[in-house]
Image (cartoon, rainbow, N blue to C red):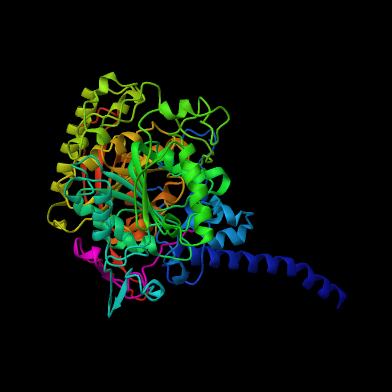
């Protein structure tokens, strides 16, 4: 008996090992063969394929390997079958603005400084490896220009703002739709009348806010659902509508669903991702910002962003000072802007408009020790990605020319200091006129014009390849993921669309050229998620974006998932890159519910020694509750 017992005990470890091996094999088969629905209730962190191939870098270092993250392009390379579908609760996930992540990682943030509304991206091991599902009942968005005034309620099933702001005409429920009457907290009777009133206060011709093309770019802080920016568009003025993902959740999502340019951001502790001297007008209507905090640091950030002679239109109770607290704030704010050398251009009823000085004369005449001080020499006002704000005034470079848009008389770019940001032509000539700040980058006017010609040919070719897939109203919200000088966007000037021009944070500072052309955009790092809601763009243009990732050892798969997140169902992607990148992306089409439209050789590129290819893709409309795929 003792012998048989000993024999049984000696076999138990072998049996247990066999059972463990079988379980591991079953788990491997389950996850590798999952069609996504089995994992729809769970959230998966990290990127399985990326980690298995050693791609899971955070982009800050190099592992020393020279092997491309795209492999060799051979058919034997790993090919994913599918991605799981994220939980329905995450249909509006913004990875770098995810408050759940903040709680889970126990980040110690100062709520008074709005740090909880700033970007906090998940580390590689906590990134979602799943596809963001559209909400139940999702429909292809209503086309522009109708979308300015009405959207499908199913696409953004949030009506709390309609109830909370019912007396201010922000938005109104109307059956299956949500309507936008054009009102706001300060302009209940319509943004169009409010905009005309601002133009009248500034004595612009015919009460037209564009001031005969001299006012083109606007920053709307605390924009709500962006009706102010939406109504500016009819005057050939484009606004960067900015708001955080705060108690008025989904306001930026509504703006983008309407086809209005918008960005998720906050005046907190970091500089906004825009270069100095980008906007002719900054606007704040009941934006609930404490402009006096930290020695006026937030107002000084606006000052950095305004062009010489730029305006700040401020509509708030403090402007008409009805009670003791309002009078105190108005007195302190007036003293602050006076020390900043701003002057009141006009004050009427509940709105005051300040104007920024045209040159450094006022700064030089201030008594020694006046606060806020001038920023230190060597401070780069165009270095913005992750850079902390400072409570200082950004002076103009020496020999700054008087503002062309403000004074409307001769300002010859060749006579300006090479870092000047004035002397801009009126819109629309501004789009194609070489801006003065090209000299910062040592780029000639001839090179600038050749860049325009090249991208005009490329865009014409793109639209020819898209062919019958694209109608005049198919594409409204466009993102150029590597915009360079903005010539891709400039080539679309005849289209009824707008472009978010994205400039890599670690490349040449060309974003200021884009703003000087009368376009808008943002700095960004494509190793991280973009600050926007899911399903907000109709077209993504990726020119050598993946090749750039290869140089930084970031995850190409993470970028594909991010592109899928921000692309609308039935939206398009144009990838212009080397052949190994194209072959890599092809392997993921089925897993991402994408379909190939066409792939062709690109015309020779002066920027690349390797021949590029053009790959046009369309995202299918798929719904989590259905097992069918509609590519309509």
Left or right: 413, with 552 as reference point: left
Quadrant in which residue 184 is drawn: bottom left
The quadrant the C terminus occupies is: bottom left
Visible residue check, residue 618: no
Residue drawn at x 16%, y 57% as measured from the top left: 469
Q: Is residue 137 magenta?
A: yes
Query: What residue range appears in magenta?
Result: 128-157
Q: Residue furthest right?
A: 2
Q: Residue furthest top?
A: 415
Picture coordinates of residue 536, whole percent (x, y): 33, 58
Dominant secondary structure of the residues highlighted in magenta in the image: loop
Left or right: 466, with 253 as reference point: left
The quadrant the N terminus occupies is: bottom right
Q: Is residue 384 magenta?
A: no
Picture coordinates of residue 493, whole percent (x, y): 17, 44
Quadrant in which residue 215 is drawn: top left
Picture coordinates of residue 333, whole percent (x, y): 49, 47
Quadrant in which residue 80 is drawn: bottom left
Visible residue check, residue 335: yes
Q: Nearer the viewer, residue 4 or 437?
A: 437
Number of numbered markers: 0
Residue drawn at x 55%, y 36% as measured from the top left: 371
Residue drawn at x 41%, y 26% as measured from the top left: 361
Residue drawn at x 31%, y 21% as measured from the top left: 416
Left or right: 176, with 285 as reference point: left
């Amino acid at each position: 008996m003792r012998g048989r017992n000993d024999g049984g005990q000696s076999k138990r470890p072998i049996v247990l090992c066999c059972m463990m091996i079988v379980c591991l094999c079953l788990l491997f088969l389950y996850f590798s063969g999952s069609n996504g629905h089995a994992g729809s209730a769970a959230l998966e962190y990290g990127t399985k394929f990326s980690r298995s191939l050693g791609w899971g870098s955070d982009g800050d270092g190099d592992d020393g390997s020279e092997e491309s993250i795209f492999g060799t392009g051979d058919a034997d390379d790993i090919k994913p079958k599918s991605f799981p579908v994220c939980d329905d609760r995450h249909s509006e996930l913004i990875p770098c603005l995810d408050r759940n992540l903040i709680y889970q990682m126990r980040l110690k943030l100062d709520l008074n400084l709005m740090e909880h509304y700033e970007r906090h991206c998940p580390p590689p091991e906590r990134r979602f490896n799943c596809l963001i599902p559209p909400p139940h009942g999702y429909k292809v968005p209503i086309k522009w220009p109708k979308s300015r005034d009405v959207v499908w309620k199913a696409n953004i099933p949030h009506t709390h703002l309609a109830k909370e702001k019912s007396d201010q005409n922000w938005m109104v429920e109307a059956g299956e739709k949500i309507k936008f009457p054009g009102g706001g907290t300060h302009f209940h009777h319509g943004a169009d009348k409010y905009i005309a009133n601002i133009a009248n206060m500034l004595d612009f011709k015919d009460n037209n806010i564009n001031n005969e093309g001299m006012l083109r770019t606007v920053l709307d802080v605390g924009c709500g659902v962006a009706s102010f920016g939406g109504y500016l568009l009819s005057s050939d003025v484009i606004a960067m509508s900015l708001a955080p993902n705060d108690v008025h959740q989904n306001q930026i999502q509504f703006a983008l669903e309407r086809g209005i340019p918008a960005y998720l951001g906050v005046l907190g502790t970091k500089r906004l991702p825009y270069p100095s001297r980008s906007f002719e007008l900054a606007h704040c209507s009941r934006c609930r910002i404490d402009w006096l905090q930290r020695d006026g640091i937030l107002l000084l950030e606006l000052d950095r962003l305004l062009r010489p002679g730029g305006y700040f239109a401020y509509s708030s109770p403090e402007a008409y000072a009805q009670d003791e607290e309002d009078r105190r704030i108005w007195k302190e704010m007036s003293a602050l802007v006076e020390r900043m050398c701003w002057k009141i251009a006009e004050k009427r009823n509940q709105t005051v408009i300040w104007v920024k000085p045209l040159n450094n004369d006022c700064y030089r005449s201030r008594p020694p020790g006046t606060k806020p001080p001038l920023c230190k020499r060597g401070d780069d006002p165009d270095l913005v990605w992750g850079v902390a704000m400072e409570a200082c005034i950004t002076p103009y470079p020496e020999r700054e020319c008087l503002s062309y848009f403000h004074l409307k008389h001769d300002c010859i770019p060749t006579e300006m200091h090479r870092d000047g940001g004035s002397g801009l032509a009126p819109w629309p000539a501004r789009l194609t006129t070489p801006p003065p700040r090209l000299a910062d980058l040592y780029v000639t006017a001839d090179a600038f014009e050749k860049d325009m010609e090249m991208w005009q040919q490329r865009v014409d070719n793109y639209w020819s390849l898209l062919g019958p897939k694209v109608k005049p109203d198919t594409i409204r919200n466009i993102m150029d993921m590597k915009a360079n000088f903005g010539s891709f966007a400039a080539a679309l000037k005849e289209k009824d669309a707008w472009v978010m021009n994205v400039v890599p944070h670690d490349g040449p500072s060309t974003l200021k050229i884009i703003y000087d052309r009368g376009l808008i955009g943002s700095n960004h790092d494509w190793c991280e998620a973009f600050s926007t809601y899911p399903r907000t763009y109709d077209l993504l243009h990726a020119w050598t974006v993946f090749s750039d990732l290869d140089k930084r050892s970031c995850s190409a798969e993470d970028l594909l998932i991010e592109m899928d997140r921000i692309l609308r169902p039935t939206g398009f992607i144009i990838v212009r890159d080397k052949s190994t990148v194209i072959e890599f992306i092809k392997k993921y089409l089925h897993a991402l519910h994408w379909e190939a439209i066409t792939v062709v050789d690109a015309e020779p590129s002066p920027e690349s020694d390797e021949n590029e290819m053009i790959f046009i893709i369309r995202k299918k409309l798929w719904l989590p509750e259905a097992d069918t795929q509609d590519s309509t």
